[in-house]
Amino acid sequence: MGGVFGRHDSHKRWIYGTKIENKIVEAMQKRETKGCSVKSFNTIILKFPKIDESFRKCKAIFEQFDEDSNGVIDREELKNSFSKLEISITEEDLNDLFEACDVNEHMGMKFSEFIVLLCLVYLLTDDPAALHIKSQIGLPDLEATFETLVDAFVFLDKNKDGYVSKSEMIEAVNESRERSSERIAIKRFEEMDWDKNGMVSFKEFLFAFTRWVGIDDKEDEEA
Ligand SMILES: [Ca+2]
Ligand SMILES: [Ca+2]
Ligand SMILES: [Ca+2]
């Protein structure tokens, strides 16, 4: 096993404290004041197939954004698509988002990275205008999926500081019936914490999900 993440080296530029990172934490904390519908770790696990299915439906959006059909979305393509969708985002935010999600740098965004980006856009645009974006993207399932992911993170982040620590992860898993799952919690945590700084950010959490549901399997085999 251990094949869940085969791209260690590509994540060395995972820098904390960037502006977009702060915005995500802020948005998450704001969201956390509203509480969440997730009641146990198992309910998150049970939603995996649904999340997987919904992610796969994003492929059509991805292909639409990837104007030259080379399998990755570059900065220019992202900019064009956002303006086509009438998503108002500053050039600076767009660049920040792009850099935050393009973990392979100069290669452009792969499908899994694009999903993470969409989810971050969803979280960061929690205002009436965002409803417009959501209808433009036209995937009600996707909205529910993003909401589930945000909810899952809110559930795990017990002290509501915008990050999930290892002890929070263990606490979340221990709340469910099986005591033996503590080992699994630690393993899951380590899979999520790419930069090994002891905390899982929402972005790391999302990337972990794209791997867990197997979005990148094919690409990884090719690489
Ligand atoms: Ca392209
Ligand atoms: Ca926390
Ligand atoms: Ca981390």
Image (cartoon, rainbow, N blue to C red):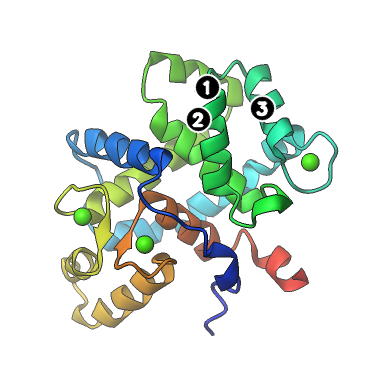
Q: Are marks 2 and 3 in contact (CB under 8 Å)?
A: no
The numbered dot on residue 206 is: none
The numbered dot on residue 93 is: 2
Q: Where does ligand 1 appear, by image quarter? A: top right
Give how far apart the Cα atoms at labels 1 and 3 are: 10 Å
Work out whether mark 2 precedes mark 3 in sequence or the reverse, and give the earlier one: 3
Q: Are marks 1 and 2 in contact (CB under 8 Å)?
A: yes
Location of mark 3 (residue): 79
Amino acid type of disc 1? Answer: Thr
Where in the figure is residue 130, as x and y percent of width and height? 45, 20
Q: Is residue 173 left or right of residue 115?
A: left
Q: Residue at coordinates 33% horizontally, 40% vertically from top-left?
A: 22
Other-residue count near label 1 (Cα within 10 Å), few / some / many at <14 / 14–19 / ≥20? few
Question: Vertically, is 105 above or below 136?
Answer: below
Location of mark 1 (residue): 90
Other-residue count near label 3 (Cα within 10 Å), few / some / many at <14 / 14–19 / ≥20? many
Amino acid type of disc 2? Answer: Asp
Secondary structure of the residue carrying tag 1 is loop
